């Protein structure tokens, strides 16, 4: 470990510019919300739980220099900041959850001076960060119970340190297994088009001493057929109240493959990823991104016809019946999801 | 159409350098078998049926300047050339089939002068080319019967003009449908790591007026779930006598997805792709390629850790029970494959 994906430092949001990895570990300091929204859109910072922290810190960044003279003015500015940041990306639940937490804590402290409200927002954001660090370790604790010694695990995208503050959800389970001496092997799907698996997951697993092998997304089926995969663990961007789970495009594909090859398929995510207001995955907005990410590598060397039509959903939805278990910081949730999510997550 | 992927021209093998597409349509003239084997290994020319033609022409290229004084000497040189070219790539059946055809035609004409034998080899190679052109059109004819008007078809890799002489197998079916006015829409899997779908399939379909949309390999499942795919057609590199089919890595993944989503999954390939000497796909050698193709884009910009371990099978095997039909120039083969392959292909 030893790195923090995102934190508050020297009057700015300090974050790892993930578009520079695996080549360079570069930190950037973001001092206004225009640059923050841009950084989120361009995926300089990404990962649902990390976006929850970015949201909390982002609200503080947007409001800390407010000249509002009364609560009404302050609340107006706050709502504007929240609305602005909410438009960064549409799928990850944690972004909206982080923004809502900031809004709620302000409403709760309505009577206090504006100077105090600002401090309260920063404190709340720092609490989101602390909670994430602790939640990821709890997820690791519960998830590791599902993993046997020498199991080989397949994962997609990056649900690790770089998607959270410093430990990871799906990869947190793997880190915990290592701490327990379970010596697991990991296959990482490269995760086209943005290659979070190739760029980020192999990077962070390698530097933490995990035996990782990179595959192209279309090779997972062959590995499973060869009996080389014992379990699949993925993160989540949003989980509906029936357990349907939106995650990085390609996750649903893996779930179908697991179903066919009778391999357990797990989702690992903090409670903040659940959206109990929606009944099923059908209500989840799936972000569609532009063609350059697909037709050229990071907008440079072309790898396809310039003007070719593309279909580019950034996420997909895995129906709950293909999910063997959802690992959260409050415990492992299994079928019947509708009932058990309410029971464990509450509300 | 209007282009030929590979042909004999001006004392050389003239072929399209497919590593330059879609940027540039560049022809290269290959005048010795060292360069030919290199071109095949580097996938400047590729596609199972095209490799059959490359094999036939390659034998002539390797033997045409022979100084052999008698048949024994000539035969020795011939065997050396064949052995040399056979080592280019291990999976595609058609390469070995093309080499064997050259060997057989020489043995059949054993009594003739060496000058004549050379001519006979060239004639045989040209016949392979003619036969491919005709076989692809027959495949198109039979395959088009399986496709309905307005069907949307998903394909992987490139089983088109660029994988054959001038028409294609899987894409030949689509060209035929267009000739029949069926107006089908095509989704092309980009086909990592070498991106034949992104670079070649979208290129040739676009220039032939087919409505094509590019996806990343991991997006196929989502398209199927959304009901947007009516059929999948892929080419083949080798088909065992029970119907098990080796094709570009990712094909088996699509077959599993089709099974789950109840979508017909077709293989389109000429008879030369069948290897009736092997009982099942388990006997097919799967080429494993190096890591640079996965960790950097065409050996240039790095997209993953330099020294990361990779698993890089170039092909996978789809078991026959996941294949709805195999489309050949002799007709459409369905279950029971073991029986029907023998009946239709003969031997």
Image (tube, coloured by chain):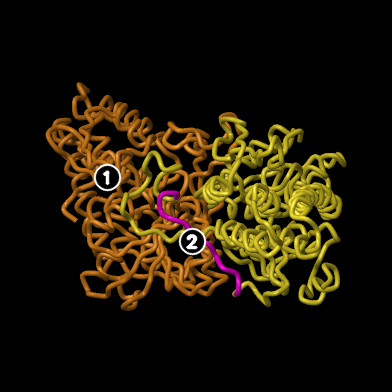
Chain colours: A orange, B yellow
Judge whether residue A164 can be spotted in this image: yes
Instruction: Decide if residue B112 is on the left or right side of residue A40.
Output: right
Q: Position of residue A50 (x, y in %)?
A: 30, 47
Q: Position of residue B56 (x, y in %)?
A: 70, 53
Instruction: Decide if residue A337 is on the left or right side of residue A5.
Output: right
Evaluate whether label 1 is on the same chain as label 2. Answer: no
Q: Position of residue A238 (x, y in %)?
A: 43, 52
Q: Quadrant of residue A333?
A: bottom left
Q: Nearer the viewer, residue A271 or B318?
A: B318
The stretch in magenta equals B283-293
Query: Does dot 1 land on a helix, a strand or a loop?
Result: helix
The residue drawn where x is 31% and y is 26% is: A34
Against B277, residue A89 (above or below) is above
Using a 10 Å C-alpha cutoff, classify the residue at mark 2 as few (fewer than 14 neighbours), some (14 to 19) or many (20 or more): some
- The chain to which mark 2 is attached is B
The CA span between labels 1 and 2 is 42 Å
Prevailing SS of the magenta stretch: loop
**Magenta span contains residue A133:** no
Q: Assign the C terminus of chain A to one quadrant of the image.
A: bottom left
Judge whether residue A283 can be spotted in this image: no
The residue drawn where x is 48% and y is 67% is: A223
Name the residue that disc number 2 marks. Answer: B288
Farthest left residue in view: A10
Q: Position of residue B57 (x, y in %)?
A: 69, 49
The residue drawn where x is 84% and y is 71% is: B346
Using a 10 Å C-alpha cutoff, classify the residue at mark 1 as few (fewer than 14 neighbours), some (14 to 19) or many (20 or more): many
Name the residue that disc number 1 marks. Answer: A53
């Amino acid at each position: 470990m030893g790195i923090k994906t995102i934190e508050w430092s020297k009057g700015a949001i300090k974050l790892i510019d993930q578009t520079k990895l695996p080549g360079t570990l570069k930190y950037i300091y973001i001092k206004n919300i225009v640059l923050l929204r841009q950084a989120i859109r361009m995926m300089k910072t990404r990962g649902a739980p990390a976006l929850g922290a970015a949201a909390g810190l982002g609200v503080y960044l947007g409001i800390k220099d407010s000249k509002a003279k009364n609560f009404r003015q302050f609340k107006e500015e706050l709502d504007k900041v929240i609305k602005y940041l909410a438009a960064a990306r549409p799928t990850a639940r944690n972004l909206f959850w982080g923004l809502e937490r900031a809004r709620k804590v302000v409403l709760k402290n309505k009577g206090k001076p504006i100077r105090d409200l600002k401090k309260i927002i920063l404190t709340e954001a720092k609490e989101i960060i602390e909670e994430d660090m602790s939640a990821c370790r709890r997820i690791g604790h519960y998830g590791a119970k599902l993993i046997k010694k020498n199991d080989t695990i397949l994962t997609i995208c990056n649900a690790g340190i770089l998607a959270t503050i410093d430990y990871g959800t799906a990869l947190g389970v793997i880190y915990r297994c290592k701490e327990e001496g379970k010596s697991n092997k990991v296959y990482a799907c490269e995760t086209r088009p943005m290659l979070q698996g190739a760029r980020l997951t192999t990077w962070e697993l390698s530097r933490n001493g995990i035996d990782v092998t990179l595959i192209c997304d279309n090779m997972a089926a062959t590995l499973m057929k060869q009996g080389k995969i014992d379990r699949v663990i993925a993160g989540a961007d949003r989980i509906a109240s029936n357990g349907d789970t939106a995650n990085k495009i390609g996750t649903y594909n893996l779930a179908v493959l697991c179903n066919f090859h009778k391999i357990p398929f797990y989702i690992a995510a903090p409670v903040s990823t659940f959206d109990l207001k929606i009944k099923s995955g059908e209500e989840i907005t799936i972000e569609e991104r532009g063609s350059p990410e697909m037709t050229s590598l990071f907008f440079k060397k072309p790898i396809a016809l310039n003007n070719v039509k593309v279909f580019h959903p950034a996420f997909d939805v895995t129906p709950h019946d293909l999910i063997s278990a959802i690992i959260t910081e409050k415990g492992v949730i299994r079928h019947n999801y509708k009932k058990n999510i309410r029971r464990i997550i509450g509300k």
